[in-house]
Amino acid sequence: MSDSNNAAGSANKSFRIRFTTDGIAYRDASIEDPIPVGSQLLMAAGIRDVENYNLFAILPNGEFEDIRLDETFDLRGKGAETFAYFESDRSFNFTIENRQMSWGKNLISGKALRNLAGVDARYSIYLEVRGGHDRLIEDHDLVDLAGKGIERFITVISETTEGLEALPSADRRFLEAHGLTYEIVNDGGVGAVVIKDFTLPPGKFDHDKVDVMIQLPAGYPDASVDMFYTMPWIRLKATNTYAACADVPQLFAGANWQRWSRHADWRPGIDGIRTMVTRAQAAFEKAK
């Protein structure tokens, strides 16, 4: 059946739509045209001077799609379609979890960001600060989107009494960019990241790959991270011995890990998982 026939068949049907101006409060409306233009949608929201407004469709994946006043939008989907409109002559772009969005005001609240990201109170919202510490955005906080560049937000599940639940965004991006598979492990309130199947220097050890465990203390990434640990235990092929300062067991999460005592100064705001991975790589290369 053609679109024109579908439209004709929908002529007597009202389509439910929802509107918001702040990403927090929503109100319902309806429209009979199944493929209205942007100006019709704004008029359905009770707006008469439509030329003074920006209109966006909030897509199922949370992204925003700009709708011009003379541009059509097909409402023949399932459920209510959701739109945001703002009295403004410009829009402000930002990303949340790498999804590009637009906002019609220079200020946006933490609560609006949470709703747009589709996460509940178990998650915290952070504003990424390049070269510094990511800034926690509470529900009542307002963020100015009018600065230089595009603001980037991330969501992180909040820490619980069970320990670390998620890594900071910079760590996650580093691991994913380098194709490193990892998991978060907690033991007695102490959190750790375990990097799976870490490749060792060819022919140097009696295993080709190990899991590398990095314990992350309370206050990480500001708090200093020191040693790292491997499983299974590995020996140098040339001597059939453990590497220097790598022969002490460390019990964690029910397993005895091989502890590698390698120490260095920690730089809060700079060092992180990238530092520890580099430190482990260097230790494996230089081991004797």
Image (cartoon, helix red, strand yellow):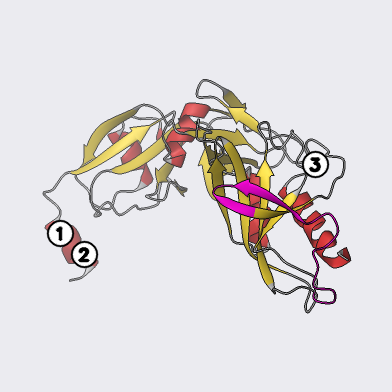
Q: List the residue tagged with mark 1.
A: 8
Q: Residue at x 54, y 24 (%)?
A: 138
* As drawn, 66 above or below 128: below
Q: List the residue tagged with mark 3.
A: 270
Circle 3 or circle 1, nearest the eye: 3
Q: Is residue 75 magenta?
A: no
Q: Give how far across and how far down residue 127 sits, in percent.
A: 63, 35
Q: Give how far across and how far down residue 158 sits, in percent.
A: 52, 34
Q: Give how far across and how far down residue 176 sits, in percent.
A: 62, 59
Give me the C-alpha separation between circle 2 and circle 1: 6 Å
In this view, the residue farthest toward the bottom is 203
Q: Secondary structure at mark 2?
A: helix
Q: Is residue 237 visible?
A: yes
Quick one: 40 or 75, which is closer to the camera?
75
Mark 2 residue type:
Ser
Q: Residue 5 vs residue 84: left or right?
A: left
Q: Secondary structure at mark 1?
A: helix
Neighbor class of circle 1 (other Cα within 10 Å; few <14, some 14-19, many 20+) is few
Mark 1 residue type:
Ala
* As drawn, 74 above or below 143: below
Mark 3 residue type:
Ile
Q: Earlier in the sequence, mark 3 or mark 2?
A: 2
Q: Residue at x 78, y 40 (%)?
A: 131
Q: Give how far across and how far down residue 3 sits, in percent.
A: 23, 65
Quick one: 23 or 8, which is closer to the camera?
23
Q: Which residues are magenta?
A: 237-256
Q: List the residue tagged with mark 2.
A: 4
Q: Is residue 246 magenta?
A: yes
Q: Residue at x 36, y 26 (%)?
A: 25
Instruction: Classify the position of the C terminus by image quarter.
Output: bottom right
